[in-house]
């Protein structure tokens, strides 16, 4: 499990909200929506501890926790969880809805580090359970969708703001702050990169245009056709040769009287057309 996902589950696993039995039942039911057996397996110790707390809170003590490879596995006696596999929450109770979704996320959810691409998902064994959770999320305007991957059904969110809202929705408020902080830093960096790329593109365009203009001017001089240019075009041509890196705006500022960027461009186009008339390709 990635570090950020582990941090989120640690925070959720430590929530002190188990006094209300309906909340406990809803969260446990959320866990079970992602499973299909009396056995629950996870690589997160925070996850398995929370699951055990939910069971103990409901006086279900006939379970044991073992290790299986790098995973924790919690096993209950047959039929002890039957009532909670099909437990129906009160859909008018927002806190029960949040607890159900929180349990599903704890049971089979992951969220990527916000420094990278945004992606949150919850994996379900049954399509009907995935659609059930997705319907709840969309009811809170969280931009979630359902897809199938191999034999599993995935509820996923790929938009940064919706992931942030999801974390707040399930109660991971500290994680929301970390997520938003990383998101802001990434957005600033992206904006800086876009500006740099834009400036680079503009610089390359200026350089390429300047190179062509200088080639046109030198061509006209080489074939003794420079005098075909108007006096104003000749003045600008000499200025361009002396200032190969200047922008059109800067060239216009050097003229007397000063000339606008569009005016400079118009004169340079006249020089270019003169070069073309005289055989320059």
Image: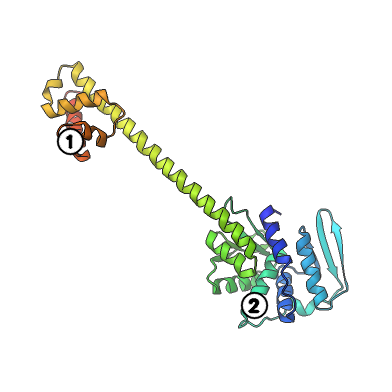
Q: Which residue is mark 2?
A: 95
Neighbours of disc 2 within 10 Å: few (<14), some (14-19), many (20+): some
Q: Decide: marks 2, 1 in contact (CB < 8 A)? A: no
Which quarter shows the C terminus?
top left
Picture quadrant where residue 22 is located? bottom right
* Residue drawn at (22%, 34%) of the image: 253
Picture quadrant where residue 270 is located? top left
* Residue drawn at (42%, 41%) of the image: 197
Check residue 108 in the rendering and tell me which mark sits there, or answer none: none
- Residue 183 visible from this viewpoint: yes
Which quarter shows the N terminus?
bottom right
Q: Is residue 32 left or right of residue 142?
A: right
Above/below status of 112 relative to 263: below
Q: Which residue is mark 1?
A: 258
- Residue 148 visible from this viewpoint: no
* Residue drawn at (57%, 52%) of the image: 117
């Amino acid at each position: 499990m990635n570090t950020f996902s582990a941090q989120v589950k640690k925070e959720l696993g430590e929530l002190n909200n188990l006094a209300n039995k309906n909340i406990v039942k809803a969260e446990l039911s959320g866990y079970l929506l992602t499973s299909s057996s009396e056995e629950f397996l996870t690589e997160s110790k925070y996850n398995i501890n929370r699951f055990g707390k939910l069971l103990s809170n409901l006086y279900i003590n006939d379970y044991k926790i073992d290790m299986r490879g790098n995973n924790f596995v919690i096993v209950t006696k047959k039929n002890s969880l039957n009532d909670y596999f099909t437990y129906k929450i009160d859909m008018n109770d927002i806190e029960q809805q949040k607890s159900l979704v929180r349990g599903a996320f704890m049971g089979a959810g992951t969220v990527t580090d916000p420094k990278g691409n945004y992606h949150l998902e919850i994996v379900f064994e049954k399509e009907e359970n995935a659609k059930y959770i997705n319907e709840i999320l969309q009811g809170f305007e969280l931009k979630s969708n359902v897809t199938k991957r191999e034999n599993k059904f995935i509820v996923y969110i790929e938009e940064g703001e919706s992931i942030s809202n999801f974390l707040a929705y399930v109660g991971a408020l500290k994680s929301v702050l970390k997520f938003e902080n990383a998101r802001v830093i990434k957005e600033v960096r992206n904006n800086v990169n876009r500006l740099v790329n834009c400036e680079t593109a503009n610089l390359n365009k200026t350089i390429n245009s300047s190179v062509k203009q200088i080639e046109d001017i030198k061509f006209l001089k080489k074939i003794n056709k420079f005098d075909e240019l108007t006096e104003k075009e000749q003045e600008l041509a000499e200025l361009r040769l002396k200032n190969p890196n200047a922008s059109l705006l800067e060239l216009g500022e050097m003229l007397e009287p000063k000339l606008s960027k569009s005016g400079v461009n118009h004169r340079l186009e006249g020089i270019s057309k003169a070069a073309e008339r005289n055989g320059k390709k």
